[in-house]
Image: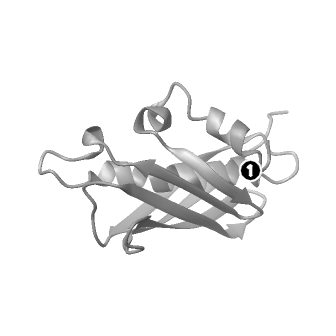
Amino acid sequence: MKFDLEKLNQLTHNNLTGHLGVRVTGASEGELQAEIDIVQHHLAPNGYLHAGTVVTLADTACGFGCIANLPEGAQNFTTIELKSNHLGTAREGTITVAARMVHGGRTTQVWDATVTNKATGKAIALFRCTQMILYPKG
């Protein structure tokens, strides 16, 4: 599955990422890109992009990046910390995310992601998360 976009996109079926319409658009060593086309259910009651939509896109990109870059013998991961700074918004169009691994250890990975408005190229959010790497028991 390492960098197979079709297989990575299959992970979005029947869960929150699929409901939100997350699409993985690129994956390579230590990097992953994804996007969402904004529709009504991505917006907050005030009519602006819901912060949860932005965080979900960023966290998904970092998580899928982690899956595609697991160390030898690792089975899975779980997010143990995340942080986001919101700098802007969008009401329509597409938002994209570029995630990159900044630390790839045996027990943890740290990922940074920037969410942008695809049409304007302006940053909407900066995001960082730490993933705990999981190994088979035994």
**Corner quadrant of residue 131:** bottom right
Looking at this view, is 49 or 119 the one in front? 119
Quadrant containing the C terminus is: top right
Give how far across and how far down residue 48 sits, in percent.
20, 55
Give how far across and how far down residue 103 sits, in percent.
69, 70
Q: Is residue 12 above or below residue 119?
A: above
Q: Residue at x 26, y 51 (%)?
A: 50
What's under tag 1, amino acid-wise?
Answer: Ala
Quadrant containing the N terminus is: top right
Looking at this view, is 6 or 29 the one in front? 6
Q: Is residue 60 above or below residue 19?
A: below
Q: Secondary structure at mark 1?
A: helix
Looking at this view, is 100 or 25 the one in front? 25
Give how far across and how far down residue 14 sits, in percent.
52, 24
Q: Residue at x 31, y 43 (%)?
A: 39
Q: Is residue 81 above or below residue 137?
A: below
Q: Is residue 123 left or right of residue 45?
A: right
Q: Residue at x 56, y 65 (%)?
A: 98
Q: Is residue 73 above or below residue 54?
A: above
Q: Is residue 5 left or right of residue 90?
A: right
Q: Mark 1 highlights which residue? A: 68
Q: Residue at x 70, y 45 (%)?
A: 5
Q: Is residue 28 left or right of residue 86?
A: right
* Label 1 environment density (alpha carbons within 10 Å; few <14, some 14–19, many ≥20): many
**Corner quadrant of residue 83:** bottom left
- Asked if residue 132 can be seen in this view, the reply is no
Furthest-top residue in view? 14
Report the number of discs.
Answer: 1
Give how far across and how far down residue 43 sits, in percent.
24, 47
**Corner quadrant of residue 88:** bottom left
